[in-house]
Amino acid sequence: QVQLVESGGGLVQPGGSLRLSCAASESIFSFNVMGWYRRAPGKQRELVATITSGDSINYAGSVKGRFTISRDNAKNTVYLQMNSLKPEDTAVYHCNAFARIGSSTRDSWGRGIQVTVSS
């Protein structure tokens, strides 16, 4: 089971920036899709951004133009650059690694990291 460790969260004022990192314990080439999801208090988990092994990228509409997902394969790390942060971005952010191998799947989650946007 791959280990995913998130870092870079914290408290930031509205309009500020943070960069989240997700370090994997094995090569992220092993996974078809790496992604970031978030869960705000009282809400369901939602997709923030995903990046495939072929570098296809998808963003939630609420973060498009403000957040950027990227990957460093040499470091087995995926990043989420978050700019122009809003209070509604406050949530626990989780890293996800997904792979489909034939009829089976690997679906791994990090423990999550808190991001709080508040003045």
Image: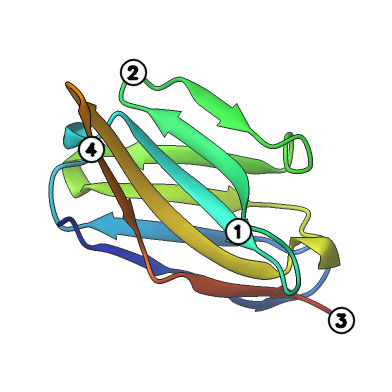
Against 61, residue 42 (above or below) is below
Residue 73 badge: 4
What colour scheme governs how the chains and residues are painted in the rendered image of this protein? Answer: rainbow
Q: Quadrant of the C terminus?
A: bottom right
Q: Amino acid at mark 2?
A: Gly
Q: CA distance from mark 1 to mark 2?
A: 23 Å
Q: CA distance from mark 3 to mark 1?
A: 21 Å
- Residue sitting at x 17%, y 21%: 102
Q: Amino acid at mark 3?
A: Ser
Identify the image quadrant of residue 30: top left
Against 88, residue 12 (above or below) is below
Question: Pointer 2: what residue?
Answer: 54
Question: Pointer 3: what residue?
Answer: 119
Q: CA distance from mark 4 to mark 2?
A: 12 Å
Q: Are marks 4 and 1 in contact (CB under 8 Å)?
A: no
Q: CA distance from mark 3 to mark 4?
A: 36 Å
Depth order, front residue of 97/53: 97
Helix, strand or loop at mark 3? loop
- Crowd rating for badge 3 (residues with CA inside 10 Å; few <14, some 14–19, many 20+): few
Of circles 4 and 2, the one toward us is: 2
Sequence-wise, the earlier of marks 1 and 2 is: 1
Q: CA distance from mark 3 to mark 2?
A: 39 Å
Question: Pointer 1: what residue?
Answer: 38
Q: Count of labels shown? A: 4
